[in-house]
Image (tube, helix red, strand yellow):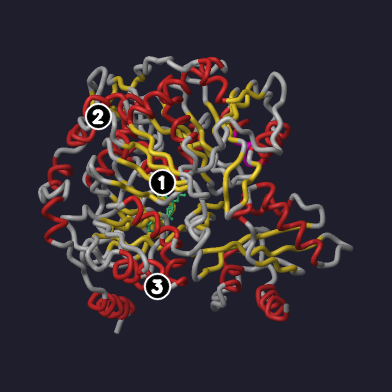
Amino acid sequence: MSDDDDIDAALESRLTEQEYFRPSPDFVGQANCTDSDIYDRYEENYPEAFAEYAELLDWDERWDQVLDDSNPPFYGWFTGGKLNASANCIDRHLDERKNQTALLWEGEDGTQRNITYQDLYREVNQMAAALKDAGVEEDDVVTLHLPMVPALPITMLACARIGAPHSEVFAGFSAQALADRVDDADSDVVVTVDGYYRRGDFLNHKQKADEALDLADKDVDKLLVWERHDGELHEDVGLQDGRDLLVSELMADNERATVEPVSRDAEDPLFLMYTSGTTGKPKGCQHRTGGYLSYATATSKYVLDIEPEDTYWCAADIGWITGHSYIVYGPLALGTTSVMYEGAPDHPHKGRIWEIAEKYDVDVFHTSPTAVRMFMKWGEQYPQDYDFDFRHMTTVGEPIQPEAWLWYYKYIGDEDAVIVDTWWQTETGGHLITNLPALKDMKPGSAGYPCPGIEPAILDDNGEPLEEAAGRAGNLVIEKPWPGMLQTVYGDDERFIDEYWRDFSDTDSDDMADWVYKAGDGAVHERDGYFRILGRLDDVMNVAGHRLGTMELESAVSEVEDVAEAAVVSREHDEKGEVPDVYVILREGVEPSEEVRQRIVTAVEEEIGKFARPNAIAFVDDLPKTRSGKIMRRLLENISNDEDLGDTTTLRDPSVPERIRDQVQDD
Ligand code: WT7
């Protein structure tokens, strides 16, 4: 038998083992998209069909052109059109549903806020006026460092209202990480909150912004400070004269203010979202107003199947793209009720998530495979203690193992809720590969079909396309632009081309057909046309659904004076998917010790954040290097994951990996 036959046989058996699950007739009967022609329609009528997505929004001026492809890869979407994102998420709902809850917020300490569309209108207007008082003008980038409190969506929408792109930095990022992003975005105004709750502690959060503004090269003019408890500042928080302003005071000055939403060009940026790449410096993915909002709204409607009447809960953090698209922009543009939870899923008990689902009678639920694996480990007694009934559930961020999928389906979905496994990225703005739930059967472990109008392909390393649906693994690329895609890397068009296009495009061409977007993931296009995502192929890892760059971690570790050289690789982890392992050569004269280990951990926490903490740190004498001195991380990855080393003959010293393996096993 040839190798190919072997692979075929293995695939055949896997395919027959993997069952399909059909959505229930009840689900199909009420679904937002039951038009089985939609895939063909979008393919045949590309890109014009995307106008339907834009039509879900209210425009001040209609677009002239759906796609401007005159200067690839700098595409324009709905060019000539004008709109405001905040007006689309708030104002346009006031006639019909001003007393409906827009944001249903549950504090970790049990406080609850029902923010109606009318309330949201008031607060966003006041905050927009406050931002203007603080000197923010249209097109200024405002950096936010806010946790899961109502202040976060309110500030985002207030920025959008005045046409100031926001750049939210996940609250778990360290002061240094915040400082780097403030500098890169060149923000004159930063917004934070005094504190928030995490596992029962009221954390002093403003402290990080204070440190960040000291660390930043830039002189930030104003730091706006929200209070987690109305009119009551965290006891350890001080305000710096002249720089710090309390949002409550600015808002009180603007109690009845209304701020006209600025009519933005479809192509004007709505926000930046920094994400890790293959180099040390995080990149600011710049998202446009019209294309992004159209895409987030349409995918919320058709993939998440949200209705305005639903109570929808995406249990992610707004500090990442998932929360931007699928807690704030998509759901609010559709006029639904979006739930936000401040705290830890196991505080004060492991039933907290299900308690909230029961309390608010959540219809549509959204979480990550890491969370599912955690719930699974805690046991099914927790969800079984509560009375909730989901119609639809989502997973996002990592591949989900069929075992975890089946558990989610059975114990959380009661074998009745439909599940969509959504593949996308910070850069893509919204889902690219996932099933339209009423049209395609579910298959555990497969993201499924491309979304309408999305054209993925699998290429080999030379850029040659693999046969369609051949069941072979390769580089996942997207062959045609889509409305939700990033516009560029903020301030760095060259990097935008290098990171996403150069490898598989003819960069001299001005024909869109020669430009191919590289996702950085490996994937298989299966025989049944479903895509299975294998994970990152570049030096980027996925820790509990958080993207981390190997280089970023290595540069943090190298900050420690004792360290001569460092390499970071990913180790597979039952719960978190992947975790970072650090291999370190210490400087002459430095002995391995608990203190050195601690210094390395602290450096990572300070440079990036606690969520990036190394799993293991190995002190080694040498690293596996090629003759030209390049570290071969793949071999370290084999060691971390207890795998065979394969070919080591290209190494300068082929004995190094075995030596490291012996050393690590002795530790
Ligand atoms: C990377 C993007 C998209 C929002 C959350 C993460 C991985 C994402 C899936 C999925 C397998 C997935 C990919 C991707 N990923 N969704 N359904 N199945 N892998 O956004 O931080 O930009 O990370 O997450 O590796 O490239 P992100």
Distance from the alpha carbon under mark 2 to that under mark 3:
43 Å
Dividing the picture into quadrants, the one containing residue 209 is: top right
Question: Please, what is the three-letter code of the amino acid marked with disc 3?
Answer: Gln
Q: Residue 447 in magenta? A: no
Looking at marks 1 and 2 on the same chain, the residue that comes earlier in the sequence is marked by 2
Identify residue for label 3.
381
Relative to 154, residue 456 above or below: below
Looking at marks 3 and 1 on the same chain, the residue that comes earlier in the sequence is marked by 1
Q: Position of residue 120 (x, y in %)?
A: 38, 29
Identify residue for label 2.
57
Q: Residue 177 in magenta? A: yes
Q: Which residues are magenta?
A: 176-181
Identify residue for label 1.
322
Q: Which of the pair 138/618 is nearer the observer?
A: 138
Q: Are marks 1 and 2 in contact (CB under 8 Å)?
A: no
Question: Please, what is the three-letter code of the amino acid marked with disc 1?
Answer: Thr
| Secondary structure type for disc 3 | helix
Q: Cβ of disc 1 within 8 Å of ligand 1? A: yes
Task: Judge whether residue 500 can be spotted in this image.
Answer: no
Q: Position of residue 648 (x, y in %)?
A: 60, 73
> What secondary structure characterizes most of the magenta part?
helix
